[in-house]
Amino acid sequence: MAKLALRDIRKTYHAEEIIKGVSLDIEDGEFVVFVGPSGCGKSTLLRMIAGLEEISAGDLLIDGARMNDVEPAKRGLAMVFQSYALYPHMNVYQNMEFGLKLAGMPEAERRRKITEVATTLQLDAYLKHKPGQLSGGQRQRVAIGRAIVRNPKVFLFDEPLSNLDAALRGQMRVELATLHRRLGATTIYVTHDQIEAMTMADKIVVLQKGVVEQVGSPLELYHHPRNLFVARFIGSPPMNFLSVRIVGSGPDGLTVETSQGARIDVPVLAESAVAGSDLTLGVRPEHIVIDAQGTVPGTIRLVERLGALTLLHVALEDGSVLIVQTDGDHGGQVDAPVRLTLLSENCHLFDAKGMALTKLMRHRLAG
Amino acid sequence: MTGSKRKFARIAIGTIGWVVALWIFFPILWMVLTGFKSEMDAISTPPHLFFTPTLESYHEVFAQADYWHFTFNTVLMSVFATGGALALAVPAAYAMAFYPTRRTRTTLLWMLSTRMLPPVGVLVPVYLIARSTHLLDTTLGLGIINLLTNLPIIVWMLYTFFKEVPVPILEAGRMDGASRWQEITVVLLPLALPGIASTALLSLILCWNEAFWALNLTSSRAAPLAAFIASFSSPEGLFFGKLSAASTLAVAPILLFGWFSQKQLVRGLTFGAVK
């Protein structure tokens, strides 16, 4: 088991910096997810930890030892690739055996380990099969098995589920989470899918353009996004945004006004706020309620019925559209007028630079 | 397209295919036929389509020259040149396919461009080098020159085959602790085997049929089959029957070898099923 520390890690490629100084601590046994849009550098960062990409500057420490110039196999890591990267000319057994053989493990011990891992992953019936004869889910299991048998200190996953169909992805997500709980190994997992990030992570690292935007538990990111980027990226359907202006401030927060004159008291630290300045108000779809007394009038433009809940796309008078989440049995019809109330304690305010104003209250699950 | 039109197109394409195939094959057929004619039949105009086959020419060919000696030389030289070229080309192609630099493409093109030089252009220097290194009329000398002339094509072919191998598989090998040597021999080469086999076959064929250097750098001791054929086109006049019989004997082994490895060759040329 291992602790990892990244100290101002940088990657320069053809004079262009793609990882711009990442510092991060990963605790022993933690499940950390790197998430971000494509091209944000999350895979590159993982490959730098793996030793498949050189680290241009900064230090990578595993259990306190500097690993920058250590061979991939000697770092005590195992990696699961997006394309599985199984050896096509070897059968399942040989695929899992390869690394052990190279490490000089005696035959009997190899056999015992592989049999044990194959049983837990339900691969015992396929040990003689070549990867080409297996389904996507089975290949994925072999790739995971190949990583487990090596008994690594740290598991690295590079978008391991993105080649699977939706149903299988959900199933593998559960399997991976269960496996992590059982093995208790430090895990770094790269994905662009924020559902995978939210459901599996102890800690999420949101990356954009080679910079860490925020590090925190899933609910911390959800309820206390540090900036507009994180607020927009985490959550589906995404957070709604409105332009507002400060009209008053006090110890209980700021009072802001929408372009249509609706006033909302948001409980945030008011220290640097100046009356009259422009802010962005963010509110998640489940924090808007349809309410005859609501201060924000609008018209339903689209109704998405998901069964358990209904998403209403409501156009306001200035043309902006808010997504409102209501229960599955809501009777809203297209073109019907509605009035909305924004639950002010759940609203977020972002300054002109896109940084969130600190909320007065922490969410009770956000840590 | 209607059914009958499609059928017509298929027949037309089939016909064109057969015409082209026969066009290419005809000289070989004619050579084989002429080898079984008497010298009189062989030079008669118009040529006789029907004749009494005879082994006369073959008897004379075997009586005049030691066929097995030439064949042995050819096999030895071709295998040496092919093996040597592969040994040099695998690391080169590996480096170019997996660690390309800005000049990789240019280097590949430049290497291929050396094939555009007519060999006769460097005959004198090559001959002089071979003479002063005592490589004239040796299998080693002829092997080296064949190795070098084929090297660009072999690097180029291996490069394209290696490019088809998914990089993550090699990276997985590295993560599993494979050294560079193991990465190449245990992971890459088995994956690229069909491609390597077809490259080797092509190299063997090129070496086998190479005549210019064979005639200029060897005389008797190391003379390959190309020289065997040439020895029957004598200044005393051409004996087409014998010449054809000798040619047939010279190409037969490589033709049969190519025939048997055809499956491998086709697999190599339609490589890409490893993913």
Image (cartoon, rainbow, N blue to C red):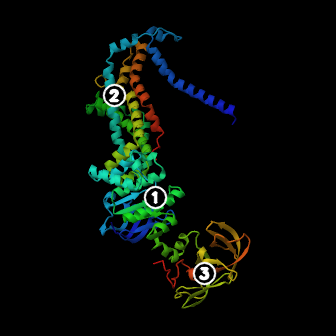
| Residue A21 image point, x, y percent | 41, 70
| Residue B6 image point, x, y percent | 66, 33
Binning the other alpha carbons within 10 Å of mark 3 as few (below 14), some (14 to 19) or many (20 upward) gives some
Q: Residue at x 51, y 25 (%)?
A: B24
Q: Secondary structure at mark 3?
A: loop
Q: Is residue A147 above or below residue B151?
A: below
Nearer to us in this view, A124 or A244 = A124
- Would you name the residue on which mark 1 appears? A160
Identify the chain of the residue marked 3, using the numbered disc in the image.
A
Q: Are the residues tagged 3 and 1 within 8 Å (C-beta)?
A: no
Binning the other alpha carbons within 10 Å of mark 1 as few (below 14), some (14 to 19) or many (20 upward) gives many
Q: Single out the mark in the foreground, 2 or 3.
A: 3
Identify the chain of the residue marked 1, using the numbered disc in the image.
A
| Residue A218 image point, x, y percent | 48, 72
- Would you name the residue on which mark 3 appears? A343
Q: CA distance from mark 2 to mark 3?
A: 87 Å
Q: CA distance from mark 2 to mark 1?
A: 50 Å
Amino acid residing under circle 2: Val
How many circles with numbers are drawn on the protein? Answer: 3
Q: Residue at x 35, y 37 (%)?
A: B148
Q: Secondary structure at mark 1?
A: loop
- Would you name the residue on which mark 2 appears? B75
Q: Is residue B91 above or below residue A21?
A: above
